[in-house]
Amino acid sequence: MSPDRVTLQRTGGIAGFNDTLVVDSDGKATLSSRGKKPFTCTVTPRVMSQLAVAADAASKSRKPTSQDTKKFPTATPDAIHLYLTIDDERIRYQDLEDRDDSYRDVFQLMNDVLASASALRKGQNIVTDGGAACTE
């Protein structure tokens, strides 16, 4: 069963990222970034299919637990922080272990959609190894 909504939040970094990408089960993706108008695109059927499979596998796997809540998100200056929310379950990328491949797959797919949506918003097109992740 695929989730109704998957959200990727990216914060931090030297550029000061504050991006939120929301992908709904119908393939509609909305990218919101600090200081920019929200941008909407459509995730390709190929990527939506992969995302549904990966998110379903992640929802059935052992949930990663936070390794250090006192230093949340991290003490490293300019670190980039990634948070994934599948329906209502929020996961930090930093908390994944080698055995959490299903969550890594979802993070990777969502990152591809984020890159594609960011490029489309700028009037460019970015193509990953498997092709474009979203279209206008």
Image (cartoon, grey):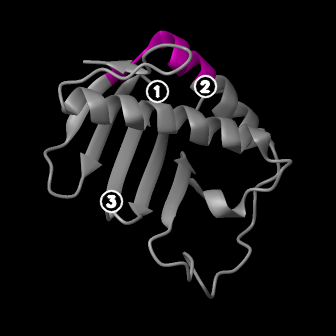
**Magenta span: helix, strand or loop, mainly?**
helix
Res. 123 visible in picture: yes
Q: Counting other residues with Cα less than 10 Å from the Cα at mark 2, is it few (<14), some (14-19), or many (20 or more)?
A: some
- Residue 62 x, y percent position in the rendering: 82, 51
Q: Mark 2: which amino acid?
A: Ala
Residue located farthest toward the front when viewing the structure as drawn: 14
How much space separates mark 3 and mark 1, taking CA atoms? 23 Å
Residue located farthest toward the bottom when viewing the structure as drawn: 70
Label 1 secondary element: loop
Label 3 secondary element: strand
User: In this picture, which residue range is highlighted in magenta?
Assistant: 42-50
How much space separates mark 2 and mark 3, taking CA atoms? 25 Å
Q: Mark 3: which amino acid?
A: Asn
Pointer 2 residue: 52
Pointer 1 residue: 25
Q: Quadrant of the N terminus?
A: top right
Residue visible at 43% across and 19% down in the picture: 127
What label does residue 18 carry, if any? 3
Whether residue 47 is situated above or below residue 100 in the rendered picture: above
Q: Are marks 2 and 3 in contact (CB under 8 Å)?
A: no
